[in-house]
Image (tube, rainbow, N blue to C red):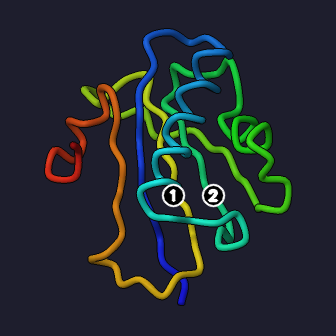
């Protein structure tokens, strides 16, 4: 069965290394908390706020060795008052787990997006 996992994080600066490192931390946390194997991942959609353009977050997944996963990066709408310097991910995975069994991950400043899901 195909399920979707969500996650988000923020960075302090529009810096390539920081974007890639925080994306790696987010992906690693999602994978560990949900016991995901690379073969279970169908695709990942990455979105960033308009103030982040120093790196494609998908590069972090490639550097983690995810070479056979479909990846896509996009910009979010620039809504007044929305969270800045934010990276979001949407993973589509094959799993036997139900939606209630999935652990979505929100880190750093992105915890305010879903305080009910943030640790």
Count of numbered circles in the view: 2
Residue depicted at x 55% and y 45%: 27
* Mark 2 crowdedness (10 Å alpha carbons): few <14, some 14-19, many ≥20: many
- Residue 119 coordinates in the image, percent (x, y): 21, 43
Q: Which mark is residue 11?
A: none
The Cα atoms of the two marked residues, 2 and 1, are separated by: 6 Å
- Contact between labelled residues 1 and 2, with CB atoms less than 8 Å apart: yes
Residue 114 lies left or right of residue 45; in this view the side is: left
Q: Is residue 58 left or right of residue 92?
A: right
Task: Point out residue 49 in the picture as x, y percentages from the top left corner.
Answer: 48, 31
Which residue sits at x=41%, y=83%?
97
The residue labelled by disc 2 is 44
Residue in the image at 80% along x and 47% along y: 65
Residue for badge 1: 90
Q: What secondary structure is found at the residue carrying circle 2?
A: strand
The answer to which quarter of the image holds residue 17 is top right
Residue 88 x %, y %: 47, 43
Q: Which of pointers 2 and 1 lies earlier in the amino acid sequence?
A: 2
Tag 1: Cα neighbours inside 10 Å, few (<14), some, or many (≥20)? some
Front position in the image: 72 or 23: 23
Please, is residue 16 above or below residue 10 in the view?
above
Numbered disc 1: secondary structure? strand
Which residue ends up furthest to the right in the rendered image? 67
Give coordinates of residue 81: x percent, y percent: 24, 26
Residue 36: image quadrant is bottom right
The residue lying at 38 percent from left, 23 percent from top is 84
For residue 101, side relative to residue 12 (left or right): left
């Amino acid at each position: 069965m195909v399920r979707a996992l969500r996650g988000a994080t923020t960075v302090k600066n529009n810096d390539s290394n920081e974007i890639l490192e925080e994306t790696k931390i987010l992906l690693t946390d999602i994978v560990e908390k949900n016991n995901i194997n690379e073969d279970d991942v169908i695709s990942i959609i990455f979105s960033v706020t308009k103030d982040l353009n120093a790196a494609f977050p998908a590069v972090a997944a490639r550097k983690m060795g995810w070479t056979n996963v479909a990846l896509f990066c996009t910009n979010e709408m620039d809504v007044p008052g929305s969270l800045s310097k934010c990276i979001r991910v949407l993973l589509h995975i094959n799993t036997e787990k139900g939606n209630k069994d999935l652990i979505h991950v929100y880190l750093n400043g992105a915890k305010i997006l879903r305080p009910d899901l943030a640790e």
